[in-house]
Image (cartoon, grey):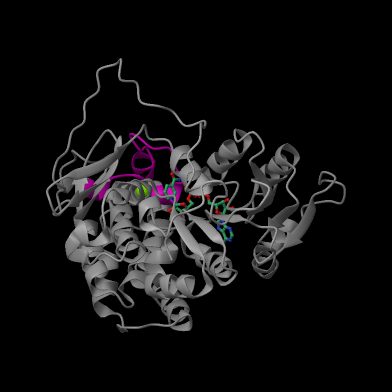
Amino acid sequence: MPALPPHQTDGPNHDVPSGGSKDGVLRIAVLGSTGSIGTSTLDVIAASSGRLVPHLLAAHSRVGPLLEQAWQMRPRWLVVTDPVAAAEIGSGSLPDGTSLAIGPDALDDLLADPMVDRVVSAIVGAAGLRSTWAAIEAGKTIALANKETLVMAGPLVMRRAAETGAQIIPVDSEHSAIHQALACGRPCEVRRIVLTASGGPFRTRSRESLASVTPAEALRHPTWSMGPKITIDSATMMNKALEIIEARWLFGMTADKLAVVVHPQSIVHSLVEFVDGAVIAQLSPPDMRLPIQYALFFPERCDGPAKRLDFDATMRLDFEPPDVDRFPALRLGLEAAARGGTAGVVLNAANEEAVRGFLDGGLRFTDIAEIVERLLNEHPFQEEPMLDDIRRLDSWVRQEVGKWVCV
Ligand code: NAD
Ligand code: MG
């Protein structure tokens, strides 16, 4: 279940963070450690004065950067999920005290180790579901960056987490802001949740010009520095669609209580409006190290490496309604959140493959939302899919998208 903000729990013990160890030290497993969220997580761990210990670092195939991290951070375990890439690691290339494990099964097993206090789920895309599920089965506290887990399997994930006692604390900056704002009232007092969106690099571009956008242009995000997939998702605003569905399941809010506002400065990370009209927001510069640290230490707060707002300088905060005509992904996100069932897995898989097709030059930018919409309408909808149904549908959708990609 999502770890509730402090006042909504039965009274958390602030001496020992939930999902924590008795000695006050938290041993962290970082899944996707070589990525954008992964490296920011290592910054937070390095700045924690020993309160956070890197227990396990896992990445897929970029063995060089992973080995560098191993020498710098000295984790107990290094996991390479791609066995072909793992073969590049020669004997003697690991520091003393670090062991190598290979493949996704080994990763799942290591996540169940009682030594692991918290798991940072920061693998990109649908691949992140498997290890997040393993952490849920093990009843761990999870700092969840991999939004795809909830988009694909939200109801199943939340139900299983409630059964195993796993806690899910969001890392996505919008959901972290909402998690913090929700502490100001009771769930029944929430009127709506408003997710902020930067609007991406094409916020002011005309609808006609969007068809000719190049991958290089789409990869230039105005406020955030992120991995390539999520950067394209920000340009199409499909990232906001994924986040609407993520919020739907994480906070148990129906789609009619979820809204989006464009806020180009990316300083207000989201807002919660309560029934009395009060709107509570969380503000900070765009720096993922803050939501990562929040999730790793929750319910504690402490000093950290994230940038801070400077109130001695003039600062503008703008808000504007989103343009659903130019960014149809937003409408698709709201529809998928309302529909539930298999809509999320289809939206996610179709988008992942279409983004790949766009980056490889086989699809136009505007094809992405169009393909997602077609598959949402045409797929065999199921109200309550199980994990196997989700996996099957995920591969079917990917094959279907392949038919549109020009090679
Ligand atoms: P990234 O592309 O920078 O890094 C991805 C990581 O996942 C790498 O370490 C890679 O080795 C690993 N990986 C890739 N495929 C894998 C596989 N098949 N099996 C195991 N590991 C695999 O991605 P990112 O931008 O850090 O994003 C990670 C997740 O966090 C995504 O789900 C994204 O939506 C979410 N997120 C990212 C940001 C951000 O600022 N980057 C913000 C919010 C949420
Ligand atoms: Mg986000």
Q: Quadrant of the C terminus?
A: bottom left
The x, y position of residue 72, in whole percent, is 72, 37
Q: Residue furthest right?
A: 92
Q: Position of residue 265 (x, y in %)?
A: 27, 33
Q: Is residue 221 magenta?
A: yes
In which quadrant of the rendered view does residue 251 lie?
bottom left
| Residue bounds of the magenta highlight | 210-230
Frontmost residue, 25 versus 30:
25
Q: Residue at x 60, y 46 (%)?
A: 34
Q: Residue at x 73, y 47 (%)?
A: 75
Up/down of 300 relative to 348, above or below: above
> Which is more toward the observer, 111 or 50?
50
Query: Which of the 4 image quarters holds residue 156?
Result: bottom left
Is 318 above or below relative to 76? above
Residue 357 locus on image (x, y percent): 40, 59
Q: Is residue 145 visible?
A: yes
> Does residue 316 appear left or right of residue 136 in this picture?
left
Left or right? Give the position of 220 relative to 388: left
Q: Position of residue 7 (x, y in %)?
A: 36, 52
Q: Residue at x 50, y 35 (%)?
A: 302
Numbered disc total: 0
Lateral position of residue 332 relative to residue 67, left or right: left
Nearest the eye: 289 or 390: 289
10 falls in the magenta region: no
Q: Is residue 402 among what the camera can see?
A: no
Name the residue nearer the viewer: 208 or 105: 105
- Compared across the picture, whether 129 is left or right of 326 comes to right
Quick one: quadrant of the N terminus? bottom left
